[in-house]
Amino acid sequence: MHIIYKTLIFDTVLLGLLGLLERFLSIFRAKAHSVADRFEDPNEMLNYSFEKQHELINKLRQDITTVVT
């Protein structure tokens, strides 16, 4: 009986600690996103995305040319 009671207490404490850890992680993630948002320039991100898409299109064209020839 005492072993079951101790196990239940341990499980309850462990779940409580895990819940607290999850909450701290959520707060940390929110703060990290907030800091990242301050440094992010929307125009710069748009230009970067455009360049990446352009690179992908060029790579696709090269791959298609390789397959066709």
Image (tube, helix red, strand yellow):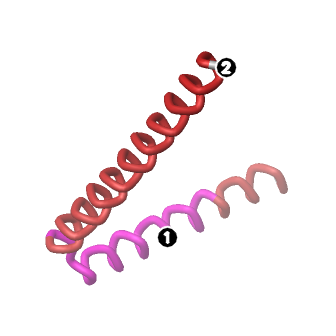
Image point 15% across, 73% down: which residue? 38
User: Which residue reaches farthest front?
Assistant: 1
How many callouts does the rendering have?
2
The dot on residue 12 is: none
Q: Secondary structure at mark 2?
A: loop
Check the picture and name the quadrant holding the N terminus: top right
User: Which residue reaches farthest right?
Assistant: 68
Residue 56 on the magenta span: yes
Task: Please tell me in which quadrant of the rendered image residue 5 appears.
Answer: top right
The dot on residue 1 is: 2
Relative to 11, is 53 above or below? below
Image point 29% across, 65% down: which residue? 30
Amino acid on which the number 1 mark rests in the picture: His
Task: Please tell me in which quadrant of the rendered image residue 59 appears.
Answer: bottom right
Q: Which residue lies under the disc numbered 1?
A: 54
2 left or right of 16 in image: right
Amino acid on which the number 2 mark rests in the picture: Met
Q: Which residues are magenta?
A: 39-59
Relative to the observer, which residue lies in front, 35 or 2? 2
Confirm or deny contact between disc 2 and disc 1 (CB under 8 A).
Answer: no
Counting other residues with Cα less than 10 Å from the Cα at mark 1, is it few (<14), some (14-19), or many (20 or more)? few
Relative to 46, is 66 above or below? above
Question: In the image, residue 53 lies at what x, y percent?
Answer: 51, 70
21 left or right of 36 in image: right
Residue 44 on the magenta span: yes
Relative to 22, is 15 above or below? above
User: Magenta stretch mostly in which secondary structure?
Assistant: helix
5 left or right of 45 in image: right
Image point 40% across, 69% down: which residue? 51
Image point 42% across, 72% down: which residue? 49
